[in-house]
């Protein structure tokens, strides 16, 4: 029996690196997601933030490019529909990032992958049922790429 795939939650900055900036640090993640070796989760709150951020004028993405990036993300992730239960997780100093912690706990993620300093500063906090990992270190934890 094959092991269960690693489960991840990607914060919005990591999703942008994957969708908009083509960051070499997260490129291996795309192959792992497409191969089913890794599962990334999203929910209504995290998807709402991504959609909002894709429209920032600084990214200069026209509506078609925004829609294409969002659709690509939806193809790469699984969406959990269940509402978030009340959480006993440690609180992130940036309340806007708490939704990523809650999602990671809800889906029993292996890792919450982030670039946010406030999220990363929580990596050693007691009470988190998942790890917090900087995106630049993600490739060290991904399964080996399949060949063939």
Image: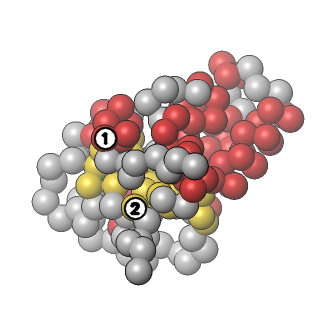
Quadrant in the picture for the N terminus: bottom left
Q: Residue furthest front?
A: 148
On the image, the x and y values in percent for residue 20 come to: 64, 29
- Comparing 37 with 43, the one in front is 37
Q: Residue furthest right?
A: 64
Q: Is residue 145 above or below residue 41?
A: above
- Say what secondary structure mark 1 lies in: helix
Would residue 47 be seen by someone viewing this image from the given angle? Answer: no
Is 21 left or right of 139, judged from the image as shown? right
- Say what secondary structure mark 2 lies in: strand
Q: Residue at x 23, y 62 (%)?
A: 128
On the image, the x and y values in percent for residue 106 come to: 41, 71
Q: Which mark is residue 6?
A: 2
Q: Is residue 111 above or below residue 114?
A: below
Q: Residue at x 25, y 66 (%)?
A: 129
Is 22 left or right of 118, judged from the image as shown? right
Dot 1 alpha-carbon crowd within 10 angstroms: few under 14, some 14 to 19, many 20 or more: few
Q: Residue at x 22, y 47 (%)?
A: 122
Q: Residue at x 49, y 39 (%)?
A: 28
Identify the residue position indicated by label 1 in the image: 140
Dot 2 alpha-carbon crowd within 10 angstroms: few under 14, some 14 to 19, many 20 or more: some
How far apart marks 1 and 2 lie (CA) works out to 13 Å
Total marks in image = 2
Of the two numbered discs 1 and 2 on the same chain, state the one appearing first in sequence: 2
The quadrant holding residue 69 is top right
Would residue 15 be seen by someone viewing this image from the given angle? Answer: yes
Q: Is residue 75 above or below residue 139?
A: below
For the rendered model, the colour scheme is: secondary structure
- Comparing 88 with 114, the one in front is 114
Is 79 left or right of 13, judged from the image as shown? right
């Amino acid at each position: 029996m094959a092991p269960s795939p690693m489960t991840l939650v990607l914060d919005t900055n990591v999703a942008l690196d994957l969708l908009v900036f083509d960051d070499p640090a997260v490129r291996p993640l795309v192959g792992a997601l497409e191969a089913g070796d890794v599962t990334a989760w999203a929910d209504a709150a995290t998807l709402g933030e991504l959609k909002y951020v894709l429209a920032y004028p600084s990214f200069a993405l026209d509506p078609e490019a925004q829609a294409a990036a969002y659709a690509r993300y939806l193809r790469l992730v699984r969406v959990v529909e269940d509402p978030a239960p009340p959480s006993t997780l440690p609180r992130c100093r940036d309340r806007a990032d708490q939704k990523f912690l809650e999602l990671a706990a809800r889906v029993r993620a292996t890792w919450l992958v982030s670039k946010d300093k406030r999220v990363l500063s929580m990596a050693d906090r007691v009470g988190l049922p998942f790890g917090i990992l900087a995106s630049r270190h993600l490739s060290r934890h991904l399964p080996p790429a399949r060949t063939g």
